Amino acid sequence: MPTTYETIIGLEIHVQMNTKTKLFCTCDNDSFNKEPNTNVCEVCMGFPGTLPVTNKEAIEKGIISGLALNCTIPSTCKFDRKHYFYPDLPKGFQITQYDEPIAINGHIEITIDSKKKIIGIERLHLEDDAGKLIHANSGTLVDYNRSGTPLMEIVSKPDLRSKEEASAYARSVQQIMRFVGSSDADMEKGMMRFDLNISLRPVGSEKLGNKVEVKNLNSFRSLEKAITFEIERQTKMLEENDTIKKETRGWDAEKEISESQRSKEEAADYRYFPEPDIPPIHIDSAWSEDLKNKIPELPQAKQDRYRKVYAIDADHARIISEEFDLADFFEEMMDYTNAHFTATNLLVTDLLGMLNKEHQSITDTKIKPKQLAELANAINDNVLSTKMAKEVLPVMFETGKDPSTIIEEKGLKQVSDKHELEQICKKAIEAMPKAAEDIRNGNDKAIGALVGFVMKETKGQANPGKVNQILLSLLRH
Amino acid sequence: MSYTNLTISTAHQMLSAGKISPIDLTKHCLEQIEKTDPTINACITVIKEQAIAHAEDAAKRYKNGEPRGILDGIPLSIKDVFCIRNIRTTAASHILENFVPPYDATVIGKLKNAGAIFVSKTNTDEFTCGASTETSAFGVTKNPWNTETVAGGSSGGSAASIASGQCLGSLGTDTGGSIRQPAAFCNVTGLKVTYGRVSRYGVISMASSLDTIGPLARSAEDCAHLLEIIAGFDPNDSTTPQVPLKDYSMEAKKALPKYRIGIPQEYFGDALTEETKIAVESAAKVFEKMGCTLIPLSLPHTKYAVSVYYILSPSEVSSNMSRYDGIRFGPGPKKIPDDLQEYFFAAREEGFGDEMKRRIMIGTYALSAGYYDAYYKKAQKVRTLIIRDFEEAFKNVDALLTPVSPYPAFKIGDKSQDPLQMYLADTLTIPSSLAGIPGISLPCGFTSEHLPIGLQLLSPAFTEERLLQLGFHYQTATHHHLTCAPITI
């Protein structure tokens, strides 16, 4: 029988922080779409004599992020220098946190197939980003705009066991960073990237296999593909009795393969030592407690609460809680309606559908939460049919008008008045004697034609349920 | 009239009284540079036009009776590791030989606001690594008292520029003795401040945890005036704490209390020349006469200081030199190799001198994985013991009195072939640098060959006013500091 293997995964997630200024200077932290080398100063260019000054906002967002990941915030953290030569690294060293990071020993909860699992977090540390190389025909150019951008590196424990878990964990970290407001975590803008640590071991074995690090994963897709690739590659090697060596591999997103970069023997010596230009940073409990109070409710907690309080679908609860603004919209909407199910449907199925089509997000819509709640109420109170509601919603989407205004303008009110409907039903029976006869004889299918007549007469405003009821009582008694 | 022993305090009085103008004073200094520098080689760059233009501005302010303070219109030299906007700043290295910073060091900005006039950027050992300016890419600075000897280092250019009458004061840096030793060699007063007392922003780093910025001048009082301007918290330098400043020049002149002055036996060992010993001991007697008590004591870990220093400082040097890769500034390699790694090698091979390469190698080794604990970490632990020595001593005494250097200025070339001998030149200044405490170097006499001898006073962190006060009173009782070097006559 062939051996089956268990996959052991740990992730290092680099998250670009959304502070106003860079980590150690006062340059704007937003270099998106800026001309190369225009968003720089002598500090982030590493000019002689310049010194780093730590951005307090970055420290605070680091603490908040650590707390949101259930980390401990040690009373002292410090920065260290990590040395290597590369043209995009102006100082010849990166300022990072080596042995005393800002946050340690955390965890988050992920849900896979409705099962919850705790994933441990080793540490979160802060560091500055390098510039970037641009390969042109004339040679290689360097753009230092990104140099000095604050990054958080979040290192998980080797608690992940599958592609699905790794992906869910990474997405969860992304949401948490967005929720606490420390990063926009936009993968397409390169604000989040992954380094994957992956090893296999025979099921039942306690001993960890040699781990392989795969770098340069810039999307969830790459992360998932790289895990699949490595599991296959390493399984094959183990089956062929090859030794898996500790090594660093790079991910080629185009070819969808990992390629060896360097073995453990060739590993760089970064010559870490404490950054003498930045004294250790002391974080007292009052400061971190104060920041803790600023953390909003996180996605998992929201999801649980929504299911409990509003009894909505698990899927709906998950979708809504993943996005801060959407959750905000949802909660405000719920303040104005008891039609929880209907309102949630309108939001998730209809409104989000329309927004997706326009490549917009919830913050772009003209519809206010209260208005969508009113629409749900109208359906629930039989003022509108679901079908009519679907006519009203696009107008709300276009104009931002109240549903009541649109109903009035369009003359869309559903007719539920018993007396009024009875008159029209009688008219229908007169007009379609054959169908009426069929029903009297017990053929209920024929009722469709009669209801259709009534709907036509009322321009679709009749409450079809009521019409059905009235027709039956008129013909059967 | 001769200005060669004019102090800043006297010059300011004369400027205020209209007896001289800042323009005359500046022109005089520039002429003195022209006259003496071909022999002395104190200057890497002479700042002629701008100095005169600034002197003209200062002259207007004096004329209107609105000088900005005591430093207004005072010609100063600046060690060539301080960035001055739009003025070449070389750190005496080929790797920065064409570097023109687009920014001012914090202290340069402060001096500009005070109206000071910069006449020159002065020579130093390359990136301040040395004790004689012999490692400078721009040649050695000669001692104005004897041009066959060194002016000391690394701030040798600053000390020599004052001693040869090229300026009234200067800014230097002191990492292991680089202000105090050249001051002693050139008969100048030099103050090494508490680590963090003066901002390092814009001053090219050597060893970040040891580097300090301080004044050199013709008197302790002048050093006090300069310190008043340059000291203090700087938001751009995280290592400057918000410790209150003193009115240093006023404090200096206050009556001398009966200070207890410690005489550490380790500083008077066999390496000391007889003449130095005699001069320093007689200086101690001057303080005794002024009412102070001399208390012999021991700083037992002194003997480890040089070893500790030559682990820690090269470690930081190797790191601080990493940015000099020939990519963003510096000449880069003459012939550009195809390979990136080779480019770095060539840029640094051609750009750095031998001593820099030596320190980069020592530091790189000390920080390497597997050696870090044995060298860097161990050295930090011993540094703590040295700090404790001083803390213990200062429980019983207010200040310590020692020689600055075991010997007077040595002959050019005498030690440059033996790095270890050169490292030992700073034996008596390194321990206090490791402890981060302030020290002052005061002229205290001459050898039979008319070479100056220096006296060092040390005090607890952030008590510069005590050193300046001791210096002021010593210089009231003596006049070694006003004796002019032969070259000025």
Image: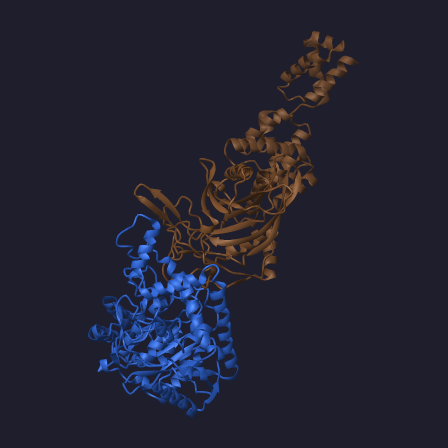
Chain colours: A brown, B blue
Q: Is residue B444 placed above or below B357 in the rendered structure?
A: below
- Of the pair A5 and A144, the residue shown nearer to us: A5
Could one spot residue B370 in this view of the protein? yes
Residue extending furthest toward the bottom? B289
* Location of residue B17 in the rendering, given as x and y in whole percent from the top left corner: 28, 80
* Location of residue A428 in the rendering, given as x and y in whole percent from the top left corner: 68, 12
Q: Is residue A434 placed above or below B209 in the rendered structure?
A: above
Residue extending furthest toward the right? A477
Q: Residue at x 45, y 77 (%)?
A: B303
* Location of residue A27 in the rendering, given as x and y in whole percent from the top left corner: 42, 54
How many dots with numbers? 0
- Of the pair B322 and B476, the residue shown nearer to us: B322
* Location of residue B2 in the rendering, given as x and y in whole percent from the top left corner: 23, 82
Could one spot residue B469 in this view of the protein? no
- Image quadrant holding the C terminus of chain B, namely bottom left
Q: Residue at x 53, y 33 (%)?
A: A355
Q: Residue at x 30, y 84 (%)?
A: B482
Residue extending furthest toward the front? A241
Residue extending furthest toward the top? A434
- Image quadrant holding the N terminus of chain B, namely bottom left
Residue B472: which quarter of the image? Answer: bottom left
- Of the pair B350 and B115, the residue shown nearer to us: B350
Residue A418: which quarter of the image? Answer: top right
